[in-house]
Amino acid sequence: MNAHLLLATLVALAAAGQANAQESGAAAVTPATSVPVAVPAPIAVDDSLTAAIGTSYLDNSIRGFGKAEILGPDGKTHVVWIPINLMGFSKYLPFHRHKEDLDRFGREPFSIDVDKVQSIKLNGLYQEHMILKGKRKHLIATRVVNGPVELFNYTEMVQSGAVMVPVGGVAGAMVMGGLGVGAYPNRSWYLRRQGGELLKVERVEFIAQMTAYFHDDPELVAALRARKVHYREMVKVVQGYNEYVTRPAGTR
């Protein structure tokens, strides 16, 4: 039994060593660049966000990139190809200037500071730099609900720690265990009434803040006070409010 466990451990360690070697080799051949380049983010799969936005923004995408109109703070519009990402962007926005660049193997994208981006339009997907009380938050969030009240979301994937577990019967041997490995979404929500300013939704003061913000919807206020809706359900909250305030007169 100990011999089998030892053999399995050696195979796992060898595979890990080979993977590390491949990663080191890949890093060695990566061309140096004077411009910080962010790795294109994968398309986020989130049922609540996808249900609110739809999937038309994925049309005509190439290798995870889509043709976008970027509006700068100076009011000028630029057409580039950027990673399609519902979660939003922070620090830097990767981009290719031309469609042909996507077909060139190993071609690294350029990048631009998100502070130089006011908004992004991509196949009906709208993203905007979050500015609270005149201060830039250095991130671009996605509008997931449009209407009398807009809802924006920025999601950061937080990596959880890996856990090393001992190999039974082999003194001192440790292998990477599955428990604790992975990532979880850390979401930030932002609200804006038509013609108003952005407001960040607070986690700790969620009930008090939202009952004050949506005070003119008694159904929603009652649900909030009864704790029937939660921070993670902001899509449902805003959709419900927008439906309420747009009902014909006399039906509320």
Image (tube, helix red, strand yellow):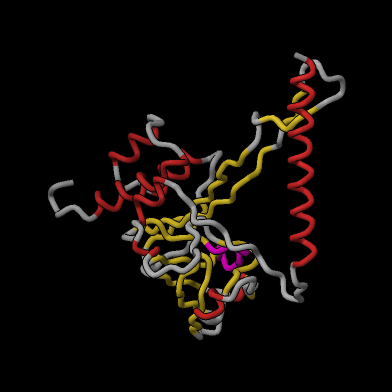
Tell whether position 136 is magenta: yes
| Viewer-side residue, 223 vs 81 | 81
Compared to residue 198, the image places residue 179 above or below, namely: above
Decide whether the magenta segment is chiefly helix, strand or loop.
strand
Percent of width and height locating residue 126: 42, 66
Compared to residue 8, the image places residue 56 above or below, namely: below
Percent of width and height locating residue 243: 25, 51
Q: Residue at x 53, y 66 (%)?
A: 83
Is residue 178 visible from the viewing direction of this image?
yes
Residue at the limit of the structure toward the right, as seen here: 172
Percent of width and height locating residue 38: 65, 65
Residue at the limit of the structure toward the left, as seen here: 250
Tell whether position 190 is magenta: no
Q: Residue at x 60, y 41 (%)?
A: 183
Span of residues in magenta: 131-140
Compared to residue 70, the image places residue 23 above or below, namely: above
Q: Quadrant of residue 138?
A: bottom right
178 left or right, relative to 207: right
| Viewer-side residue, 45 vs 116 | 45
Quadrant location, the N terminus: top right
Q: Residue at x 66, y 38 (%)?
A: 160
